[in-house]
Amino acid sequence: MGLNLRYMQLADIRQVAAIDVICFEPPWSYESYTFEITESDVSHMVVLDQQSDEAPPPSPRRQLLRARLRDKLRGHGPTTYSTGEILGYGGLWKVDGEAHISTIAIHPANRGLGYGEILLAGMFGKALQLDAEYIVLEVRVSNSVAQSLYQKYGFNRVARKKNYYRSDNEDAWDMRVSLGRDTRHRFDRLYEKLRLQHGFSDAYSRASRRRG
Ligand SMILES: CC(C)(COP(=O)(O)OP(=O)(O)OC[C@H]1O[C@@H](n2cnc3c(N)ncnc32)[C@H](O)[C@@H]1OP(=O)(O)O)[C@@H](O)C(=O)NCCC(=O)NCCS
């Protein structure tokens, strides 16, 4: 089984939205994902997928059908297709010196296995690659699991935003981490440990952005 961090593609939205609807109220719309992937200049959406080694190669008939579909869609749709199972996803906006984590989620069936940390580390690395000065995010005050993950990467609670979540008026913590030298060294150590532990490939944090 291979774990891969990579940029989110249009073909991933169906799987991503299925996780989103379980994790957040309200979930993002299909159009929001499309905009983030194809139009926004500041957005860097990521997925963590798992390729199965046991998947048999497609039959010649299926290969032919896929080739025909690709021809049909050329210029009208996505040119790449997600093949693995998406375990989770995240989003990062980079504006001036700020990197803002807009979302992060792992399917409930796959939590507690280190996958959320891989996604966060990927976005952290992307913020560094883009020369951000700091990373910021909002998190529910009741979400101690996510807060613990962010604290592991040096985020601190800097302000409480009253009634931030419209669905139920819960407050949010504004959490931030400055990307100074010490933080970078700490991140490098955590990232290497994570790579050794999970052996994932990373075509996101050090790659340049490709659309759709
Ligand atoms: C937050 C979330 C992404 C974490 O993903 P995950 O894959 O379960 O987390 P990981 O297994 O990678 O654990 C990473 C760290 O998170 C924290 N964590 C994970 N599970 C925890 C638990 N049950 N209790 C406390 N802390 C926990 C720990 O700090 C852990 O580091 P450690 O293993 O060194 O202790 C996941 O719980 C999720 O998708 N939640 C719903 C969506 C959400 O709340 N997103 C955040 C919005 S701000």
Image (cartoon, rainbow, N blue to C red):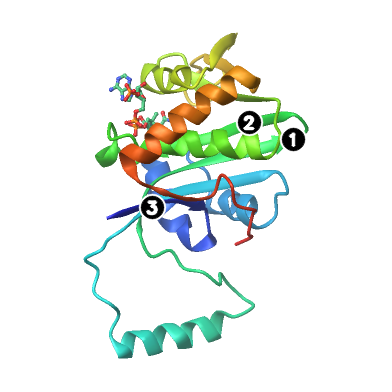
- C-alpha span from label 1 to label 2: 8 Å
Question: Within 10 angstroms of label 2, few (less than 14), some, or many (20 or more) residues?
Answer: many
* Image marks 1 and 2: residues in contact by CB distance under 8 Å: yes
Q: Nearer the viewer, residue 163 or 69?
A: 69
Q: Which residue is mark 2?
A: 100
Left or right of residue 121, residue 31 in this image: right
Residue under the image location 47 percent in, 88 percent down: 68
Badge number at residue 146: none
Q: Is residue 163 above or below residue 107?
A: above
Which circle's residue, 1 or 2, is located before the other in the chain?
1
- Please tell me the numbered disc located at residue 49: 3
Quadrant placement of the N terminus: bottom left
The amino acid sitting under disc 1 is Val
- Quick one: SS at disc 3? strand
Residue under label 1, please give it.
95
Residue type, label 2: His
Whole-angstrom CA distance, mark 1 to mark 3, is: 27 Å
Residue 170 image point, x, y percent:
48, 16
Instruction: For mark 2, give the secondary structure.
Output: strand
**Residue at 64% of width from left, 21% of height from top?**
181
Q: Is residue 116 left or right of residue 178?
A: left
